[in-house]
């Protein structure tokens, strides 16, 4: 009976340990080895989507029902399937995505806390005074696999949960982030680079 009670006991971490845990998980997703995951998000009826995303350092690619986008670290290229249009921006241009850029994030702008509950490790981030973008976040990590399962994010006055499945870290080729121009040769191109 004691073993069963111990298994379900909550463990809390110091702020320093919580930050260290967060940094490990953040690097697992955005580090040089790369990662991929399936996501589903519903921002209080304003924006709902799901798709697959790949990350590797400053590079990314995502696919959802409306768009495919490649960011090779220099150029952000988005294919709007229905319009048969290719829109090009600089990789860091905030105009490239009116929703994703609202979720700006700099790890040093937050305080950290963490605890274990059941089969999850929950890491909470709270924005320091004056920080814009993400005000608070809770990262849900599977304790057995160490993989993320979701992120609850508060931006402005609303919150949303991003559900994460099919997570895989490592084995991501740089070729994945190169826009295949020949595949979309007959699309209309709009170049918004400055």
Image (cartoon, grey):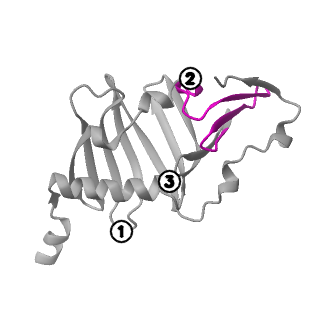
| Residue neighbourhood size for the residue with mark 2, other residues' Cα within 10 Å, grouped as few (<14), some (14–19), many (≥20) | few
Q: Is residue 29 above or below residue 95?
A: below
Give the residue pinned by disc 1: 144
The image position of residue 192, as x and y in percent, is 67, 22
Residue 18: numbered disc: none
Q: Could you give the CA–CA distance between mark 2 and mark 1, rounded to whole angstroms? A: 39 Å
| Residue 95: image tag | 2
Q: Residue at x 68, y 35 (%)?
A: 77
Identity of the residue drawn at 37% across and 57% down: 25
Point 48% across, 37% down: residue: 41
Quadrant containing the N terminus in the rendered view? bottom left
Q: Which residue is mark 3?
A: 165
Q: Quadrant of residue 69?
A: top right
Tag nearer the camera, 2 or 3? 2
Question: Magenta segment range?
Answer: 69-97
Label 2 residue SS: helix
Q: Earlier in the sequence, mark 2 or mark 3?
A: 2
């Amino acid at each position: 009976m004691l073993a069963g009670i111990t298994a379900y006991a909550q463990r809390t971490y110091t702020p320093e340990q919580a930050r260290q845990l967060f940094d490990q998980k953040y690097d697992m997703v955005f580090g040089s080895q790369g990662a991929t995951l399936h996501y589903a998000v519903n921002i209080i009826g304003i924006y709902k989507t799901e798709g697959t995303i790949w990350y590797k350092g400053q590079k990314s690619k995502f696919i959802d029902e409306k768009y495919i986008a490649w960011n090779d670290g220099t150029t952000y290229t988005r294919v709007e399937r229905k319009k048969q249009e290719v829109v090009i921006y600089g990789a860091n241009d905030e105009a490239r995505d009116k929703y994703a850029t609202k979720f700006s994030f700099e790890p040093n702008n937050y305080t950290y806390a963490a605890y274990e509950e059941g089969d999850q490790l929950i890491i909470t981030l709270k924005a320091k005074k004056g920080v814009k973008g993400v005000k608070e976040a809770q990262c849900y990590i599977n304790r057995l696999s160490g993989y993320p399962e979701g992120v609850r994010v508060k931006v402005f006055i609303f919150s949303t949960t991003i559900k994460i499945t099919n997570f895989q870290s490592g084995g991501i080729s740089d070729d994945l982030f190169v826009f295949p121009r020949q595949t979309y040769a007959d699309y209309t191109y709009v170049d918004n680079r400055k």
